[in-house]
Amino acid sequence: MQDFSTCRPILNNSRRMLLLASSILLAACTTSTAQVSNGKAATATTIAANAKSVSQLDLDDPQDFKDATRGLIASPENIQIPSMADPQEYVWDTKAYNFIQGEAPDSVNPSLWRQAKLNNIKGLFEFRPGIYQLRGFDLSNMTLIKGDTGWIVIDPLTSKETAKYAYDFAMKHLANRYPDMSSNISAVVFTHSHIDHFGGALGILSQEDIEKNNIPIIAPSGFMEEATSENILAGTAMLRRSSYMYGKNLPRNEYGHIDSGLGKGPAFGQFSIIEPNILVGKTPTNLNVDGVDFQFQYTPGSEAPAEFTFYLPEYKVLSGAELVSRNMHNLYTLRGAKVRDALKWSNYIEEARTQFGDAEYYFASHHWPMWGKDSIQNFLKQQRDTYKFIHDQSLRRINKGMTPGEIAEDITLPPSLASEFSNREYYGTIKHNARAVYQNYIGWYDANPAHLDPLPDPQRASAYVKLAGGGSKVMEQAQTSYDEGNYRWAAEILNHLVFDDPSNMAARELLAKTYDQLGYQAESGPWRDSYLTGAKELREGTPDAGVEMSAMRDVFLQTPVSNFFDALSVRLKSEEANGLNTNLKVHFTDKNESYLLWIENSVLHYRLIDSTEATQKAVQTTLNLTHPLFVDLLIGKVTFKEMLSSADSKIEGNQANLITFFSLFEAPDPSFAIVLPD
Ligand SMILES: [Zn+2]
């Protein structure tokens, strides 16, 4: 089927043989904004549901718009940032979102539309004299604090392109305010280990600058490990699923992607990372950074596995990082990830509230700031209680024997929390977050033996279709349910029909129309994008989108090689390794590090060895190469054959064994089917 996305497969199968690391959350794909809309009009049911969902909200409340525009210094009319890899493409294009104005169209939940308008507000803002924010240049914010000798940069965005563009924009407009100040960066602070908060680092700084000028790079303990490994084992699946969550391939229009709740969406450019030279691993940690006092709160295992917040006592400013934001966050993220601990998260917010109780100003890594001690205290209590409410009330129901689906259906926030915009389900939802609490404590099994070993999906689908009296009966029922506005049931039975017979285009179209309506009703950006991406793929088929791994080169060069061997382990074609006892030594000549890889019981093992170790006597083949060559092999910049003939590699021992060894590993499938059986 036709693929409208601009992502392209750059690696053929043989090149992918060694692609150990297509396991990264974000791919360097950009989305065309000129796609043909498949959107269908909102039904009366959807229009009514949307009106009802916001009946308790004052959508005209101006406070957020005041806060989001306060202190504006300059706002570009449009921000269109070209890709470094392909200057014909934009990694960031705010023009695509200019249609988000005025009243919500029928095909968008009005509350999400409001959030999308707020997230459209962009520019350089003065938060406090000496503290400036760049918002709307990426999914996340870059914050600049004036130090004694230069600018302290908090969170340099997702990609090198957006970071450089944003920083240059700030310098252009701050130069006349601070004529005596250079545009030098005097420190960088990474608040947490998610790529939208560090990926642009090398766009504004070079490794040489850091070393030459002793620039402090400050991050929470565990940052490097988490940033480079968090998604490496299950990354291919996460990446494919993230195209659903963020609507990467959807058109930007009222029938497509409008917002992700947290911001517009990720910037898919060139990613990078810098190794921190100062780690913060306890609360409180006090540091003076280029003349500015910082008090850190270490919050690992909250929103990110390595994270901190901080307080600037001279300014009475609290930076909440991503511990708090102006939406309900994800305890479980739809792209797939380990679930987050709601109770821990809530407790950290309370710790921040009390520890930094003097705060009169608040900013964070997403969304717009807040002014006033009472407002900040109230906001922190609200966020604290949103996560604790979901935690406590999910467990209350778990202990009454309720199943995940029953809990998701039953639990709603109390009016005192639900009426606050900053708790609304723009990103996470209470339904999927309640399921996350179940998963965290109880796991996948609901204890009903009927669910212990059910037939797999395609078989179940066929059995249900047969039970219903055949496909035409299911279609009839589905059409009735659709006409009645019972979209959740229509989706259930049509999904069986499509899985029973994916060539049934009428069933696919009706299911797509059903998903359209469910998408239009969603207050959550990721829910909307998931439904609408499902609809798109039902109509057009599964896209053949590859993964542009070269965008991750700078990150991979900083990733411990053992992570790649872990990733290789989960690609072993175990059925072909039955009974094999084979090994390989990989020696990194520039690092003088050697690893022994061996297969035993259809399992790949590896360990660091030293050159004198006796086991080397049994080594069948040694592959000597440099770490950068190894990385280039992983990202497909060089082929396996080119690697073998490179001056930076040398094989010792049996070359045939090397080829056989690597033939035992398969490439993951970056474009697996989701709404279709295969
Ligand atoms: Zn973020």
Image (cartoon, rainbow, N blue to C red):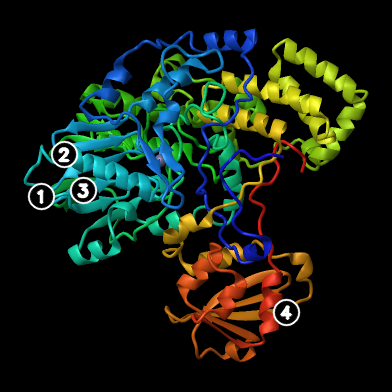
Mark 3 to mark 2 CA distance (whole Å): 14 Å
Mark 1 to mark 3 CA distance (whole Å): 10 Å
Disc 4 is placed on an element classified as loop
On the image, which quarter does residue 451 sit in? top right
Disc 2 is placed on an element classified as helix
Q: Are marks 2 and 1 in contact (CB under 8 Å)?
A: no
Nearer-N-terminus badge (3/2)? 3
Q: Are marks 3 and 4 in contact (CB under 8 Å)?
A: no
Q: What amino acid type should be assigned to the residue bearing mark 4? A: Asn
Pointer 1 residue: 148
Nearer-N-terminus badge (3/4)? 3
Q: Position of residue 288 (x, y in %)?
A: 15, 51
Disc number at residue 581?
4
Q: Give the class, few, some or many, for how many residues have Cα within 10 Å of label 3's Cα (few <14, many ≥20).
A: many
Q: What amino acid type should be assigned to the residue bearing mark 3? A: Ile
Disc number at residue 152?
3
Q: Is residue 30 shown above or below 617?
A: above
Query: Closer to the observer: label 2 or label 1?
Result: 2
Of 655 and 425, the residue lying toward us: 655
Q: Is residue 423 shown above or below 29?
A: above
Q: Position of residue 519 (x, y in %)?
A: 60, 23
Nearer-N-terminus badge (4/1)? 1
Q: Are marks 4 and 1 in contact (CB under 8 Å)?
A: no
Q: Position of residue 663 (x, y in %)?
A: 70, 70
Q: Position of residue 548 (x, y in %)?
A: 54, 53
